[in-house]
Image (cartoon, rainbow, N blue to C red):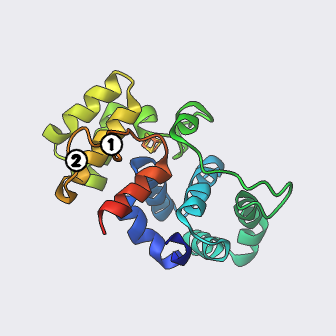
Amino acid sequence: DGGHISASHVDALVRKHAPLCMRNLHESLRRDKHLKHYGRLQYNLFLKDMGLPIEEALLFWRRSFANKTDEQFSKEYKYNIRHGYGLEGKRVNYPAKSCVRIITQDQPGPQDNHGCPFRHFSPANLSAALATHYGLAPAEQSEILTAVKAEHYHVGCTRLFELTHAKKGIRKGDGLGNGESVNHPNRYFERSWEVSR
Ligand code: SF4
């Protein structure tokens, strides 16, 4: 039940269950104590869909932006976080972005951390991220890198899910269940959490 997630759970949950796009945003946020606009947008909606309530989200972002003063945080970031939760402006309860949207819209520039690493990272950076965040040796990475080279980004992401959940009984071709491939970061997260219980 996602309703009980608090700010202090985010680190562990994301490191254990999130797909690479969100893991990358999380680690960038930890490293830089900041994320640029589209990165905040992508990650905020993911956390909302994960079940992080607005008060916990504000706490999470406030703590993460450790170099900002309370005043800066309130002035520059609070509105957009609340906006993502449908609490400001037109009060639209925005859905978390799907893979298609992340892959095709708002292309990241060199200073950005949003987007889909399977689509937007160089092969060398993707390989390094797979090794660092998921402990995948080069031999284990080869199928993923081949799929990505053929521009089958979701296939690469699905294969990553299968490889990193092999100990939970997930086999090649299982995907997120019934052979379904990854089409949404939150479905990846939910399935990972589900099979790990
Ligand atoms: Fe994220 Fe989807 Fe890319 Fe996987 S395929 S890293 S879930 S955007």
User: Which element type, helix, strand or loop, lies under badge 1?
Assistant: loop
Q: Is residue 144 above or below residue 192?
A: above
Q: Residues within 10 Å of mark 2 (few under 14, many from 20)?
A: many
> Dividing the picture into quarters, in which one does residue 194 lie?
bottom left
Residue closer to the observer: 194 or 137: 194
Q: Is residue 150 above or below residue 88?
A: above
Q: Amino acid at mark 1?
A: Asn
Q: Residues within 10 Å of mark 1 (few under 14, many from 20)?
A: few
Quarter of the image with the C terminus is: bottom left
Circles 1, 2 touching at the beta carbon (< 8 Å):
no
Q: Is residue 125 visible?
A: no
Q: Earlier in the sequence, mark 1 or mark 2?
A: 2
Total labels: the figure holds 2
Q: x%, y% of residue 39? A: 58, 50
In the image, farthest residue toward the right: 90
User: Which residue is pictured at 60% across the width and 69% down the height?
Assistant: 61
> Dividing the picture into quarters, in which one does residue 119 lie?
top left
User: Which element type, helix, strand or loop, lies under badge 2?
Assistant: helix
Q: Is residue 120 visible?
A: yes
Q: Is residue 96 above or below residue 76?
A: above
Residue that label 2 marks: 163
Q: x%, y% of residue 106? A: 63, 36
User: Distance from label 1 to label 2 (Cα)?
Assistant: 16 Å
- Ligand 1 position by quadrant: top left
User: Which residue is pictured at 36% across the width and 40% down the height?
Assistant: 157
Residue that label 1 marks: 178
Left or right: residue 14 versus residue 102 is left
> Dividing the picture into quarters, in which one does residue 108 lie?
top right
In the image, farthest residue toward the left: 139
Left or right: residue 169 versus residue 86 is left
User: Which residue is pictured at 76% across the width and 75% down the height?
Assistant: 71
Q: x%, y% of residue 132? A: 28, 53
